[in-house]
Image: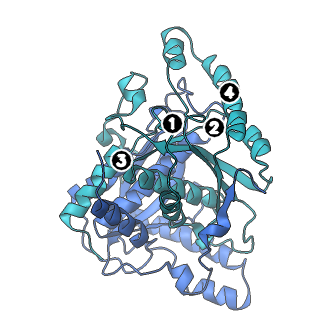
Chain colours: A cyan, B blue
Amino acid sequence: MNFSPQEKETFYKLIAARRDVRSGFLADEIPKDVVEKVLQAAHQAPSVGFLQPWNFILISSSETKQKVKKAFLKANKTEAELFSGQRKELYENLKLEGIMEAPLNICVTCDTTKDSSNQLGRSAQENMDVYSTVCAIQNMWLAARVEGVGMGWVSIVHQQEIRTSLKIPENHKIIAYLCLGYVNEFKENPELETKGWNERLELKDLIKYEHWN
Amino acid sequence: MNFSPQEKETFYKLIAARRDVRSGFLADEIPKDVVEKVLQAAHQAPSVGFLQPWNFILISSSETKQKVKKAFLKANKTEAELFSGQRKELYENLKLEGIMEAPLNICVTCDTTKDSSNQLGRSAQENMDVYSTVCAIQNMWLAARVEGVGMGWVSIVHQQEIRTSLKIPENHKIIAYLCLGYVNEFKENPELETKGWNERLELKDLIKYEHWN
């Protein structure tokens, strides 16, 4: 199965148009079949030993979201203290999550005890099941974008609080807490770039040949 | 920027057609502009704090590949000992890497000390820079597939041996060692599925609502 020049172009357009969305979520519910497509894309990610170690918790109740939002606010306050002066001011003006506004939140976990006799591909590098799960999340991000759904990854929250709120068993590692919803627009560039938090690096400066030096 | 029904279809076709490729690599060199496209896709991945913490080491010398292959063989032998009976026989008959045959190997690293004053998004979850790098790798996988290039992730190798062979500084975490090359065919299903190593799970069994139970 080959891809035509036009199909390649579609793919690169998508890669460039994907954004980490934290604001502008619309209240419209995401139809079930669209959510299903996004999760099916995740489920087709590569996984070490074909483990498929992921689970997806779909959250739409305000009560649960409120708990996570509270945990975010706490971690956000602590994180803000790491910065000072103009940088702190900029940090405090960034919108870093859309927990309450996004109609759908999804927590993605990785079962670290799954199929424990199947150590294929992870006896030398034990994090491979976690990495498989992150690959699944990137598939979700792209699938959401192609559907016009914005997705944001909320990492400013302590995992123990998510674990307690969602009653996640200890053997399941929390990998991501995601916010999803339709948006009116996807920004042309990452917000952290346009607002001057950090600069886009040149790819050529990140490539090495044969070995590090 | 919206995606048409046909463009969506292209994306889902790609998601389904991507494979972890370990055999069937052709010797043909991958043109520079194609390698560049794959790396540009990686570089457009989301990154915490817009860190872009990744580096890419492009390896084509047989001498270097040979060192990594040797490290693979050692780890592969140790891993095989974890299985017994029919399972061990099946393991030993799996082709788990294409280090020597693939014309291009790429080692992807994550700079864990990059921009250390920029802790946005990772003061509560410290692995976020690593996860960003894995997102970049999934972008590479899809970009390679759209270009007709097979890519495989070799995780049966101890990272210290890669570090030594490629002279990677201690502050850069090794995330993946990848093999890339054109292939005659992409298998319809994952090899670990068709060879009976593991079964495809039902997505519906992996979804939970509101909380774990």
Viewer-nearest of discs 1 and 2: 1
Classify residue A162 by image quadrant. top right
Q: Nearer the viewer, residue A106 or A31?
A: A31
Report helix, strand or loop for mark 3.
strand
Return the mark for residue A75: 4
Viewer-nearest of discs 1 and 3: 1
**Amino acid type at mark 4:** Ala
Residue B149 sits above or below residue A172 on the image: below
Q: CA distance from mark 1 to mark 2?
A: 10 Å
Return the mark for residue A208: 3
The residue positioned 71% from the left and 79% from the top of the image is B81
Residue B135 sits above or below residue B15 on the image: above
Q: Residues within 10 Å of mark 3 (few under 14, many from 20)?
A: some
Q: CA distance from mark 2 to mark 3?
A: 26 Å
The location of residue A70, given as percent across then percent down, is 70, 29
Report helix, strand or loop for mark 1.
helix
The residue positioned 57% from the left and 65% from the top of the image is B157
**Would you say B89 lies left or right of A208 here?**
right
**Would you say A29 lies left or right of B59 here?**
right
Which chain is mark 1 on?
Answer: B
Report helix, strand or loop for mark 4.
helix
Q: Residues within 10 Å of mark 2 (few under 14, many from 20)?
A: few
Q: Nearer the viewer, residue B70 or A30?
A: A30
Return the mark for residue B126: 2
Do marks 2 and 3 share a chain? Answer: no
